[in-house]
Structures are given as C-alpha cells and as structure tokens.
Amino acid sequence: MTYSTLRLCSGRAAYEAVPYPRLSLDLGRVRRQLELEGVPVTDARVMLIARFEREVTIARDGRLLIKSTDATEADRLFARVRRLVEANVVPTRDS
Amino acid sequence: MSGGIDSPVALHYLLRQGHEMLTVHMDNRPFTDDSPLTKVLDHLTVLRERYHQKIPMYVLPHGSTQITLMRNTDRHVGCVLCRRFMWRSAERVAEREGASFLATGESLGQVASQTLSNMRSATAAVDLPIVRPLIGFDKQEIEAVAKSIGTYEISTRPGLCCQAVPDRPATKSSLLQIGREEERIDVEEILDSVLRNAVVM
C-alpha cells in the first residue's frame, strides 16, 4: 500500500493523503481502536471523523483529510492515523 | 448562502431589484470547517452595507442530516438528497418568516448537483417558487460581478470543500429512486430537529 505525499488540498485549508491503489478499510475496527485511545469519533458509515487536536476524516477507501494548515502538525497526525489504517485493511481479491 | 462565489452575487441581484431578503446557511460541519460560516458572515457585512438592509441569516445545522443520509441511503444520489433537505429547510424558514419565494446562486451544469435532472429531483421537494438569478451565467461572468461588488476575495479564501460529496455523484436521478431512498429515513423528524436548532444572526 502506498500513500502519495501528504499535500495541501485544493481548498488550501487542510492536508490530504490518497492511497494508491485505493483500499478497503474496516472502519468499525478503526473506530473502536480510536475510541480505545480516547479519541472521539463520528461514524458516518462510509467515513469516520476523528477529533484529535485537529479533526481527521478517514474514508473507507483510505483517503485521509487532516484539518490543519500546519505541515508539521499534519505530518504528526498523518503518521498516527496511517498506522491505524495500515492495521485495518480488509484483504481484497486483488491484494 | 454557502460561502462560495455564486450565492452573494445572486443575493446582490435580488437586493438591487429592491427585494427584502433573508438568508439561510446550511452549517455542514463536521464535513467542512468554520470557513464557510465566516465567509457568509463577511459576505453579508458587504451586502448589508451596500444595500442598507438588515438581511437576517438563519444558520441551520446540516452535518447531522448528512450523517443520517450517509448511514441510510444510496451514496450515489447523496448530493440530490442533501439538496432536497436544504430546499425543505429553506422553505420551512420562508414559511416561518412569510417569505414568498426561494432563491439560489445555481447556474446550469457547474457541478454534479446542478444538472437539469438533479435540479428537478431536488426542487420537487418544495412548493414555493424558486428564483435563480444566475441560471444562464458562466463562471467568468459571475466572478466578474463578485469582484465588482467586493465578495470575490472573501469567497476565494482558503476553505474546505464538502467532504460528504461521493466519489461519483449521480448526474441523473429519478423522483421514484429519490422517493425510495427517503423512505429509509424520517424526513419530518430531521426537518423538525434542524429548525429547532436554528440560530438567527
């Protein structure tokens, strides 16, 4: 699994990371792990919105959006969320 | 009012014609950030000053509606379902305030939700007449007006796009299909909750 570089999104108000190829995540497991770490989560079924010190959206296909314009902060949150994501990929026929 | 380029321009034309206007902003957090709301407030400051009108604004929560739609309905038609709730919410506000029409900054074909088919599906949810001052404008024309009235700089500040937009939103939709999707949710209960939590600014 490969994430492209963390980059400023088109609206210039957040950082985004897009995996290639797209993933299939078990968002239920990601949510439970976040909650165990004390991170409040909104579960919209097709995506989670995790409230770290900044909100991070985790889509079922692995796309991440970090609502910060501070590159250092975004990098730190990306590393934390990436670990969780990588641990919860659902194997597909292609993988 | 969305915080984008189009809605303040549409409002400008209606104010210029002498209509007394009130506005609605659908607060889409957590699927966006604070920027749309602050942009709309700044747009209104510009237009209130220009037209010496109070222009009240209803801020209506929309994030919880989006969550309900995502959990219970087909993502493919998510933008149409979302817009139907925006229209219905605006109509409820209009009824409360005695307004006689609804207005938007839509123009044909700019985004997925603005195809003629989707516009029809979305607006079939309401009865009040709908005015679209920008319907035949292209983006360059709208931007030129926005620059001339002083709202363009506000609209183009950094801000998050709606994250609830599906990967491949439907550009065509049928009322039959939309009706089936809405049977999975309690439309009236959602609208009651939205209006109960309205904030007027």
Image (tube, helix red, strand yellow):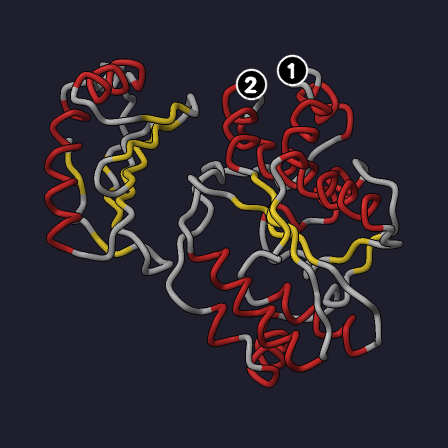
Which chain letter goes with mark 2?
Answer: B
Quarter of the image where the C terminus of chain B is located: bottom right
Residue at the spot of label 2: B72
The kind of residue on which mark 2 rests is Asn
Q: Is residue B112 left or right of residue B52?
A: left
The reply to whether discs 2 and 1 touch (Cβ–Cβ < 8 Å) is yes
Q: Secondary structure at mark 2?
A: helix
Residue B19: image x %, image y %? Answer: 84, 70
Residue under the image location 73 percent in, 46 percent down: B90
Q: CA distance from mark 2 to mark 1?
A: 6 Å
Q: Is residue A95 left or right of residue B153?
A: left
Which chain letter goes with mark 1?
Answer: B
Residue under the image location 24 percent in, 33 percent down: A21
- Report the front residue among B156 and B17: B17
Quarter of the image where the N terminus of chain B is located: bottom right
Crowdedness of circle 1 by 10 Å Cα count: few (<14), some, many (20+)? few
Q: Are marks 2 and 1 on the same chain?
A: yes
Rendering quarter of residue B20: bottom right
Rendering quarter of residue B178: top right
Q: Is residue A64 left or right of residue B11?
A: left
- On residue B97, the disc is none
Q: Secondary structure at mark 1?
A: loop
Residue B81: image x %, image y %? Answer: 64, 33
Residue under the image location 60 percent in, 49 percent down: B59
The kind of residue on which mark 1 rests is Arg
Residue B68 higher or lower than B118, as above or below: above
- Report the front residue among B54 and B5: B54
Residue at the spot of label 1: B184
Residue A75: image x %, image y %? Answer: 12, 47
The first of marks 2 and 1 along the sequence is: 2
